[in-house]
Image (cartoon, rainbow, N blue to C red):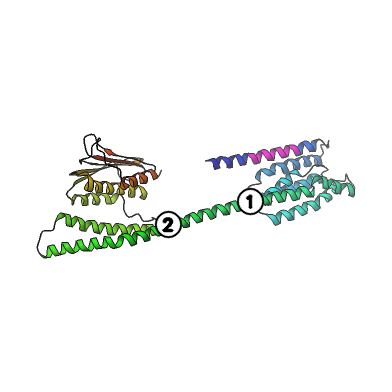
Amino acid sequence: MSKGRFRVRAGVRDWLIAVGVAAALLVTGLSGQHSATGLGLLGYVLLAVGGLALAAGRRAPVAVLAVTGLCAVGYQAAGFDVAAVAFLFAVYAAMRAGHRIVTVAVSVAVLAALPLAALASGLHDTGEAFAQARGALQIAWLIAAGAAGEALRQAEQRADEAERTREETARRRADEERLHIARELHDSLTHQISVIKVQSEAAVHVARKRGEPVPEALLAIRDAGREASRELRATLEALRDDDTTPPHGLDHIPELVARAGKTGLQATLTIQGRQHDVPAAVGRTLYRIVQESLTNIARHADATTASVHIDHRPDAVALQVDDNGKATPHAAPVPGIGLLGMRERVTALGGRLRAAPRDEGGFTVQAELPVERAS
């Protein structure tokens, strides 16, 4: 917002400068006591136009340079001994915009035309005409204005280039770190998870081949191994693809709750409100919260039931996961890495998270994530 205000102020400042220069030129012209003839009126008009043209200096610097130069030559020819202040401003703006060759060419043309214009006025001889031209536009002023504009242009160009370099460096480092994490995950987890998956599937196959009942725990291990393998593969792909293809979202939560029921936990899912599309990051975060909550319930809560409630609101999605485990307000579990990860995900999306024991016993996880709707 501050940049927007700065742009507005810059436009106002341009107009203030233009009006100020035009007023100064007119006052200087009026002090010369020129007659109200057609030539005199033309001179006043050229003085005003030359000053006011500066208001467009940011948008059309070359055009403003040409207009102010012609006006300076014009009111010199009309007999107005007024310094070409507006042209100096235009030289600065054009040089700052990078139009160096055009600026130099126009400046040389104006320098050559000013003495001729003074001669054309019929008020001076040759010596006086050149003296008046030097007074109207000192070469030193011209060089200073051009040098200042060029220096500022180069400084802004260097600043822009440095900003682009910093952004590219940060992006490259982030890509390298993401690939490093992907390699570490692959090297450290893929083999172990594959062993768990293969061994559990082999055990289930052998038990069924012998006609023996397969323990529910073994089936849960097999399913968890399959899911972990798929999750790891999807996570590695997401890390390598800059997380452009999120592996899970809201649509996968029913499957997650149903799978939790196979471990002996009575898990229920309730969805309330009008469902609508949510950003992928929000859906992924809600899935991870449910996944982590159900995992904690199965491992630590000593619970028999768990409920997952999702409430779709006009501008947010609310999630609540409750269990009837052993947690109490007086014996709250120590927060671990899973809860810390939940909080970081929710905070990054501008949401709120509450995880604490319930007064009636058990543990609750409540999250609310804002959703930006298309208008």
Q: Quickly name the residue at label 1.
A: 155
* Kind of residue at disc 2: Glu
Q: Residues within 10 Å of mark 2 (few under 14, many from 20)?
A: few
Secondary structure of the residue carrying numbered label 2: helix
Say whether residue 247 is left or right of residue 37.
Answer: left
In the rendered image, residue 222, in percent from the top left (x then y), is placed at 21, 58
Say whether residue 143 is left or right of residue 128.
Answer: left
Secondary structure of the residue carrying numbered label 1: helix
Q: Which residue is drawn at 61% across and 53% down?
A: 158
Q: In the rendered view, would you say 111 is above or below 191? A: above
Q: In the rendered view, would you say 239 is above or below 343? A: below
Among numbered discs 1 and 2, the one appearing first in the sequence? 1
What stretch of residues is rendered in magenta?
Answer: 13-24
Along the line of sight, which residue is nearer the eye, 188 or 38? Answer: 188
Task: Let me know if residue 177 appears in the view.
Answer: yes
Q: Is the magenta stretch mostly helix, strand or loop?
A: helix
Along the line of sight, which residue is nearer the eye, 201 or 335? Answer: 335
* Kind of residue at disc 1: Ala
Q: Residue at x 26, y 57 (%)?
A: 227
**Mark number, residue 177:** 2
In the rendered image, residue 7, in percent from the top left (x then y), is placed at 58, 42
**Mark number, residue 90:** none
Q: Residues within 10 Å of mark 1 (few under 14, many from 20)?
A: few
Extreme residue in the top direction: 359
Task: Inspect the magenta stretch and tell me whether residue 18 lies in it.
Answer: yes
Task: Inspect the magenta stretch and tell me whether residue 36 lies in it.
Answer: no
Q: Which residue is drawn at 81% across and 35% down?
A: 31
Q: How far apart are marks 1 and 2 (CA)?
A: 33 Å
- Snapshot quadrant of residue 176: bottom left
In the rendered image, residue 241, in percent from the top left (x then y), is placed at 39, 59
Q: Say which of marks 1 and 2 sits in front.
A: 2
Q: Which residue is drawn at 69% across and 41% down?
A: 52
